[in-house]
Image (cartoon, helix red, strand yellow):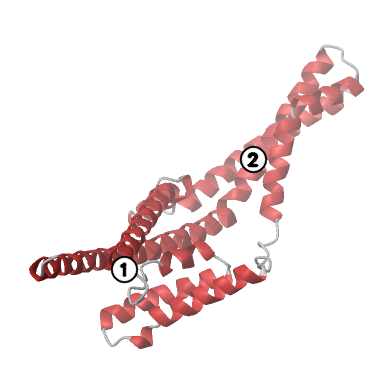
Amino acid sequence: MKPAGLIHATLAAEKETARLLEAIEAKQRQVEELTIAIETLRSEVDVFERRYNAHISRYYLELDTVELEMKEYRLRLQLRRENVNEEEIEARVESCFRASRARVDAYEAVNEAEPTPPADKLPDAKAKHLQDLYRKLAKRYHPDKTIDTEESKRREQLMPLINRAYNEHDLETLERLSLGETELHVPEKTVIEKRKALQTELRQLNRVASQLGFEINRLKTGRTYQLKQQVETAKRTGTDLLTTLAKDLERKIKASRGQLARLMNMWHRAQ
């Protein structure tokens, strides 16, 4: 190849490398922003879910339990009118409502469950990988290692996320954030090999950004987030939607308990 052609090829390769590096840096920043966004979103949903469970779930569980008992007594009374003996009545009631009773019991067990225990100890290889990723990211994103104010703020958002992922053995999050660090200064690699490595890195970042965007959409279209939005919208108009809902459920439970008491009295009087 003539010198001019060699120079042209070299310049073209350098331009392509620069373009890929720029694209990787932009996509890396997008992945970081999406990771922060999804972490914030999950945290908000978790906080709301705990609030909702504390104020509302127990009412739904109580209402479901009372309504199930009402159905059981209505069936008992119906079978009694058909002159079915008591042993057969109880067998029929148990058979008809076995699935409903199991569902209510499962909900109750979830509500009374202990907090999720810490993650199990990782195998040595994974533990080392986790530690290596954490050290790499802590070094890259430590707020004290930049003098740029905006960059420092961004790192202050990322470091708690990185610490959380490390403590909870969340390898997926750490691996996502570690992308975008293709090593170019390796003598053994040709220009073509380096370009292919950069292209692979960019494809990985694009895939991760797409996955994070999908997960954010999934969370936002979920029932818990939608209810959270309704509660917050109502609050801006001066309405406490959860308190209103709790009071409505209390009234329904009271009415249902009255009906259940009447059904139980009818059953016991007929014995």
Quarter of the picture containing the N terminus is bottom left
Q: Alpha-carbon neighbours of circle 2 within 10 Å: few (<14), some, or many (≥20)?
A: many
Residue 148: percent from left, percent from top? 26, 84
Q: Residue furthest top?
A: 82
Name the disc covering residue 236, or none: none
Question: Where's residue 250, x and y in %?
Answer: 59, 45
Badge 2 or badge 1: first in the primary sequence: 2
Residue at image coords 38%, 57%: 204
Q: Residue at x 91, y 17 (%)?
A: 85
| Residue in the foreground of this view, choosing between 148 and 2 | 2
Label 1 sits on residue: 190
Q: Amino acid at mark 1?
A: Thr
Distance from the alpha carbon under mark 2 to that under mark 1: 70 Å
Numbered disc in front, either 2 or 1: 1
Mark 1, other Cα within 10 Å: few <14 / some 14–19 / many ≥20: few
Left/right of residue 268 with respect to residue 193 in the rendered view: right
- In this rendering, the answer to whether 263 lies above or below 107 is above
The answer to whether 245 is drawn above or below residue 157 in the figure is above
**Nearer to us in this view, 179 or 112:** 179
Under circle 2, the secondary element is helix
Q: Is residue 249 left or right of residue 267?
A: left
Image marks 2 and 1: residues in contact by CB distance under 8 Å:
no
Q: Position of residue 29 (x, y in %)?
A: 31, 67
The image quarter containing residue 180 is bottom left
Image coords of residue 121 (percent x, y) = 68, 69
Q: Residue at x 32, y 60 (%)?
A: 196
Corner quadrant of residue 2: bottom left
- Give residue 63's mark: 2
Q: Amino acid at mark 2?
A: Leu
The image quadrant that residue 192 belongs to is bottom left
